[in-house]
Image: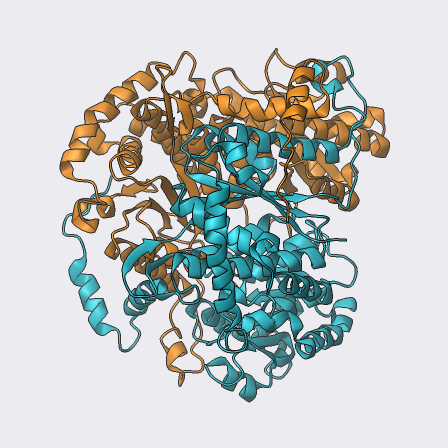
Chain colours: A cyan, B orange
Amino acid sequence: MDRLTLDYTHVLDAAVGPDHGLTAQELEGIAPQTEEALRAVQARRTKDLRWMDLPHQADVQQDVLDYAGSMQPLFASGQLKNVVVLGIGGSALGNRALHAALSSPFHDIEPPEGLPRLFVLDNVDPDLVGEFLDTVDVSKCLFNVISKSGSTAETMSQFLVLRQKLIDAVGEEAHVRHIVVTTDAEKGVLRPIVDAEGYASFIVPDGVGGRFSVLSPVGLVSSALVGIDVRGLLAGAADMDERCKGAAFADNPALIYAAIQTLMQNKKGKPMAVTFSYSQRLASLSDWYAQLLAESIGKRKSKGGADVFVGPTPVSAVGVTDQHSQSQLYVEGPFDKWFTLLAVERADHVVTIPKQYADHDALSYLGGRTMNELFAAEREGTRIALTDAGRPCCSIQFPSVTAHTVGQYLYMMEMAVAVMGELYDVDAFDQPGVEAAKVATYALMGRAGFEERRTEIEAAKSKDPKVV
Amino acid sequence: MDRLTLDYTHVLDAAVGPDHGLTAQELEGIAPQTEEALRAVQARRTKDLRWMDLPHQADVQQDVLDYAGSMQPLFASGQLKNVVVLGIGGSALGNRALHAALSSPFHDIEPPEGLPRLFVLDNVDPDLVGEFLDTVDVSKCLFNVISKSGSTAETMSQFLVLRQKLIDAVGEEAHVRHIVVTTDAEKGVLRPIVDAEGYASFIVPDGVGGRFSVLSPVGLVSSALVGIDVRGLLAGAADMDERCKGAAFADNPALIYAAIQTLMQNKKGKPMAVTFSYSQRLASLSDWYAQLLAESIGKRKSKGGADVFVGPTPVSAVGVTDQHSQSQLYVEGPFDKWFTLLAVERADHVVTIPKQYADHDALSYLGGRTMNELFAAEREGTRIALTDAGRPCCSIQFPSVTAHTVGQYLYMMEMAVAVMGELYDVDAFDQPGVEAAKVATYALMGRAGFEERRTEIEAAKSKDPKVV
């Protein structure tokens, strides 16, 4: 079957020695804690951690599919050509990751017949948004505005800009059909706007934080619109839920992964967690995971309120590409990283390398082989080089890249990170550290109520700037 | 003028305290070493470090521009539509970074009149290459094959595959015009093939390692073909060369940057160097820099041959996007990073946010302002949040994003990294750590001469794999 597997042979002391590898005692020692953590997390499933139930909400799935079905004729006829996500962070990274993994890498260059392009406009860089306005015909766009609170400055400023451009292009009445909003059911700024304007809308349920929202309409609407198998995705996530929710440590990939991460940082002194995707299509999953890990576990305070300043730093790499960029450091540099390879057992394509120039030694071994063989040999070659150099390395193995396996991955990582929160003793579901920058931004933008902070910022300006 | 500046006010103890910030004594202490390092590097300019002279080679520039000019009619007439780089690592990252920085973000979606798209095919993932073959018409492509040695497995397997597809599509004779090769002048596998087939070609000069090759034909050919101002790029690099080659520490941004990096890791215990690009267009420069830094400084051996296992880990982030993904960790997590913001003073576009929904407090402060103001306020807000939390943070300021400022950046970073090599006491120009993976790959692919390694690999396979 297409069951995801976690191979952790090469994070163990047998593979990389006891300084860098985990011992049986270390794993046995932490196993009961992971099981207790899992029980603590599962106990909140029907309370504040509602994201855990997202794979099972058949009615929401149906609503999303019905909506996508209703829009399909507009894409088929060419009345609409682009879906544009206006969102950022958890309202963008999942959308991009799913599109990268489950659409063609050239989807937006040559869109398949009847399907729209998907742009995820997750920045307010005027050179990005300005160039978008110069290049893309807004009258051919469906904008998916995603913000639970409706107060996200970036998303809302984009909404204000693009709504006006739409009205200029197609008129006040017609612009309504070009916008679909994903936001809170009742609270916040966007819901009353949806009601007043008559936009189509979806709900970000309570108990679903941004970085745990990919399996809600936040991630599903744009996916369904570009033809991704949303049912398969959720079925994969549901299967992983079933597999992890009650299983003991030895059979539970989420618990084992959480244990490895925690021990690698706290016992083996490795502050960096590298996701090394041996798949171009899966590479964006590591950006999604980077937010999940960094925002959930990167915390100043323990649950008890003590200053702890903890958290692993996620690093993304792509194989084989980054063998030619980062492997030198990974193999020879400090022992400050551990690695997770994403491996795909069966690609969708077979590319055969022709036998040519057989008299050249550096080419002859390639002829008649496939790129599939080369790609797999390079992945295994890199794994061997890493572990021979004492760098621990596990593999998450995808039988193939499908909505079902990607769904398994997403859910496994969400569960692993929730459990890590317990093991690191931090609240995995808040993000107090982003407040300071927001307040400073409001102050600098002159938002009412932030005048005092602005005065402080002015006063704190260096009298002796060092600029060369 | 459009001179790049380095603002290092906020890496100093006055900004972030003496535990995390550099003291005047520390900078004064390292300054003479940086100047000595610069002299050592400059002494090799006409010997083995020929990359230092690349900005000044007017004849090469002219050859590249002449070639691009000769191809222009084929793009204008639609006979050719795509330029495809077949290269990896240093033969890909610069090409992609220049295209991202100096072409529109939507260039490949809607190519400007008369200009080709640019694809950089820097992987052998069969799902990437296979999908390319399924989607892109090779008879409309110009392939730029880049490998100094001609023995890079990835590039050469792509070359073999695509050459055959070309011949199948356009015939043996016509295929020649679809290939331009950038390789060694005499040595290696590709030069004799170029001679035998009659391909157009450019030279990767000696003394120009892959990661220092962006200003050679390696980076210039594809850039010129997509309409990038190659002269401006090289003029910017030449200006930075002039500015850095003899200047004392206090006036020398490359030396100051090298000093900060070295002290941050070796005195302040920060293993990670985050390039936080507050510009979507400049974001790919950080991937280029990631190779430059990681491969140059990530080394097991000191110059004297002792085991040292050193090197900073480059981390790439994009503002404002990653404020919603990584800032939580950056502000509250361990004190294990220092930051370089890439800041653009003057964007090419001004995007005004309309005044709408003024009764909503969370929106009213945005109306009538520009995205440019918001973007700048968020950058400064993040800088303030980082430094208030004791996280050192410098800024490299681009007056605007032009070929000239990007050229300055590239050369400044190359020079800084060359100097870091001396300060870290490692050879910044080799990459012995990539050999082990290559050998293992050859062994697994059954290349002649690697049978013994294959036997070893088979014997080393775990008898007790741990898979869940």
Which image quadrant for residue B139?
top right
Q: Nearer the viewer, residue B299 or A117?
A: B299
Residue at 60 percent of width and 86 percent of height: A198
Q: Nearer the viewer, residue B89 or A185?
A: A185
Residue B125's spot in the image, x, y percent?
68, 39
Which image quadrant for residue B144?
top right
Against A360, residue A73 (above or below) is: below
Residue B23 appears anywhere in the view:
yes
The furthest residue to the bottom: A196
Against B255, residue A140 (above or below) is: below
Residue A314's spot in the image, x, y percent?
46, 48
Residue A275 relative to residue B341: left or right:
right
Q: Nearer the viewer, residue B39 or A174?
A: B39
Count up the numbered dots.
0
Q: Quadrant of the N terminus of chain B?
A: top left
Residue at 74 percent of width and 30 percent of height: B178
Residue at 71 percent of width and 59 percent of height: A404
Residue B262 relative to residue B180: left or right:
left
Residue B281 appears anywhere in the view:
no
Residue B23's spot in the image, x, y percent?
16, 40
Residue A214's spot in the image, x, y percent?
58, 65
